[in-house]
Amino acid sequence: MQNNASILIGNSFPLSLIRRPVRIEPQTLSALQSATTGKEIVSFWGHTNTLKRVEQFTELDLSPAEARPVLQLQKSGLPSLVGQTFCECWIVSPDYISSFRPAVGAEIPPEKIAGWQILKLTWEISK
């Protein structure tokens, strides 16, 4: 069952878990902050080296309950984490300076992050 009391947030979403129609829309920081109001944040933030920076940007606690949490896919095709199922997911990912690509597992120097991109993924719900 979909959870309306919580909001799912991460730094990326694996496209291999999209098995039903989904809409992806760029969003503003104020839209993200409004969407989190009064909700428990369920985070699957996977990169500890950018966590502090994104928390400064969003003014939200995006610490996951466990290190490198793994999203699951329900039979319905909706993502779930910590026993909760979601029809919406917010992604906040860094925009790096031109021509920069971080090495696997490397710390990202603050001067390499040019800004942040916010996306809202919404799965269509059959009626």
Image (spheres, rainbow, N blue to C red):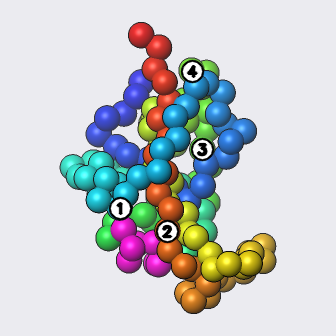
Residue 81 seen: yes
Label 2: which residue?
116
Q: Earlier in the sequence, mark 4 or mark 2?
A: 4
Q: Quadrant of the C terminus?
A: top left
**Magenta highlight range:** 51-58
| x, y percent for residue 65 | 47, 58
Badge number at residue 81? none
- The amino acid marked with disc number 4 is Ser
Query: For residue 29, which numbered disc appears in the image?
Result: 1
Residue farthest front in this picture: 98
Q: Nearer the viewer, mark 2 or mark 3?
A: 2
Of callouts 1 and 4, the N-terminal one: 1
Give the residue at mark 4: 76
Marks 4/2 in contact by CB < 8 Å: the verdict is no
* Secondary structure category for the residue under label 4: loop
Whether label 1 touches label 2, CB < 8 Å: yes
**Identity of the amino acid at label 1?**
Leu
Residue shown at the point (41%, 52%) measured from the top left: 27
Mark 1 crowd level (few <14, some 14–19, many ≥20, 10 Å Cα): some
25 with respect to 106 (left or right):
left
Q: Nearer the viewer, mark 1 or mark 4?
A: 1
Q: CA distance from mark 1 to mark 4?
A: 30 Å
Q: Dot 2: within a 10 Å radius of its alpha carbon, few (fewer than 14), some, or many (20 or more) residues?
A: some
